[in-house]
Image: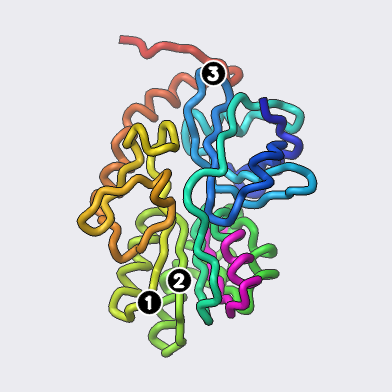
Amino acid sequence: MFEIVKKQVLAQSIKLWEVLAPEIAAKAQPGQFVIVRINDRGERIPLTIADSNRAQGSVTLIFQEVGRSTMEMGRLQAGDKILDLVGPLGKPSEIVNYGRVVCIGGGVGIAPVYPITRALKQAGNEVISIIGARSAEYLILDQEMAQVSDQIYITSDDGSVGQKGFVTDVLRNLLEEGTAIDYIIAIGPLVMMKAVTVLTRPYGIKTTVSLNPIMVDGTGMCGACRVAIGSETRFACVDGPEFDGHLVDWDVALMRSRMFLEEEKIAMQHIHGGGDCQCQTKK
């Protein structure tokens, strides 16, 4: 069992946990993730490690309540314990001195891009960060991102914070202005990451994305997290989660992300009381 030692509401439907997990905290590197299971009937949820505190022996996880499992997670409080926390999983981010880098985070994707941005800054890079959210009430970690960036741009769909528009609008302006960029990492919704790669491909800028498909075991055995990268099938859990964005087959990734929407709707209909609901679908 793993104790939640801190819970914080970062924004509407977005929660932060600090969880005691000394062995994971001791080994976690930027870009890696864990798989969470809150009880013996719980779904396995992959979450990127947003931060780790080796002295305290804790890892920071940030998630958005979008389905039944994450809503059940959101009900837990500091002092509660979760059944399983497995990690660190996946390959760490490549942290080198590229020169000038652009770090892009969309929505809850700001959480996984934050430790990577910090590490890239510590490696000597000049960091330009672009973060975006639907509106001010959904924006997270803007102050933390500002502290590890040389420049930061904030966007919102409705203009309630920062510049009205999308993160890709800022990136397009930088590219059209002739800003020299050596490396880009983008993490967020699939449509956002795809749009970033469409923009950067003509410029030949190395662009990395982090994919978060459905996972089961997190060890490459089940094959549920397979993604099409160039002419190859890869597994996000062991070959990623980061990939060359210009090689990702975005149509396949988007199609697979929608495979269980109807099942999720059915599961959501049966949420009531605590997280131990065992309702069966009525025929």
Whichever of callouts 3 and 1 sits on the residue coming sooner in the sequence is: 3
Q: Which residue is the extreme one toward the left?
A: 231
Q: Which residue is mark 1?
A: 205
- Label 3 vs 2, first from the N-terminus: 3
Is residue 19 something that shows in the picture? no
**SS label for mark 1:** loop
Q: Which mark is residue 40?
A: 3
Examine the rendering and report whether any part of residue 34 can be seen: yes
The local secondary structure at tag 2 comes to strand
Give above or below for 250 relative to 39.
below
Q: Magenta span covers which residues?
A: 115-135
| Image spot of residue 257 (x, y percent) | 33, 43
Q: Amino acid at mark 2?
A: Ile
Which part of the image, by quadrant, shows the N terminus? top right
Element type where label 3 sits in the image: loop
Label 3 – label 1 distance at C-alpha: 45 Å
Q: Position of residue 226 (x, y in %)?
A: 31, 43
Amino acid type at mark 1: Ile
Q: Which mark is residue 184?
A: 2
Quick check: 40 above or below 184?
above
Q: Residue 61 is drawn in which quadrant?
A: top right
Q: Quadrant of the C terminus?
A: top left
**10 Å crowding of disc 3: few (<14), some (14-19), many (20+):** few
Q: Label 1: how many residues lie within 10 Å, few (<14), some (14-19) or many (20+)? A: some
The mark nearer the N terminus, 2 or 1, is 2
